[in-house]
Amino acid sequence: MKSPVLHLASALSLVVFSWTAAWTASAAQSTNPQLAETIERHFASMSDVREGGLICRSQVEEVQQYLRKTQGNIPASHRLLLNRVLADGAPLTKFFHAEHGEAVLCVAASKLAGYAELEAIARTAAGRNQIRAAIQSDQSDALVEFVKEELAAKSSQQGQQPGQPASKTAGARIYTVEQFIEAALATPSSGKQAPNG
């Protein structure tokens, strides 16, 4: 079993590696590399999916529909995975798809622990204003500092260590293609599955 530090370092490296290298690593670690490759190829064929980029429900739904058609009802096509992905209308999703949003938020996510912290601040008016300002100025540094300050303040109020990573749980949010593949391949495949829908 990996130590928590190595596990965190592995998770952060996914943002840094190239699209193909990250997907290849995920597939190599899986018990079903063919499924991982199928998912990778389908996401790669989408014009609005980028390396390290945020994915949304409509994109995952498209992949899951394809999987149902080609492979039947498998754990990777289960609706519970879809529910863990940001909705198309979520504030962070809207910002990501705005002009310059993708570039700024990808850089910010790579400097942070991923998109979870950006999603958290996108829920507040002050956070949305900071994200909007960062996108308009095409600069992520002020946004990253704002997020770190907000997290430190929240952590001190809750008595936690600043920057303490969130634990990986079965219901953790899925933000990227790599995370979707990891969750899809980690889903138990034994026994009958409940209907998708």
Image (tube, rainbow, N blue to C red):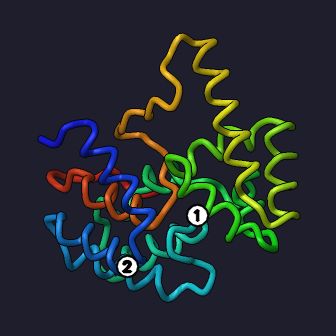
Residue visible at 24% across and 45% down in the picture: 6
Position of the N terminus, as image quadrant, is top left
Q: CA distance from mark 2 to mark 1?
A: 14 Å
Q: Which residue occupies the foreground of this view, 115 or 190?
A: 115
Left or right: 70 as drawn, with respect to 101: left
Mark 1 lies on residue:
54
Q: In the image, what residue type sits under mark 1?
A: Leu
**Viewer-nearest residue: 68 or 22:** 22
Percent position (x, y) of residue 50? 55, 77
Residue 149 in percent (x, y) is at: 69, 31
Percent position of residue 63, x then y = 46, 74
Q: Where is residue 122, by image quadrant?
A: top right
Q: Residue at x 61, y 62 (%)?
A: 107
Please name the amino acid that badge 2 sits on.
Glu
Q: Quadrant of residue 18?
A: bottom left
SS under mark 2 = helix
Q: Nearer the viewer, residue 137 or 122?
A: 137
Tag 2 residue: 40
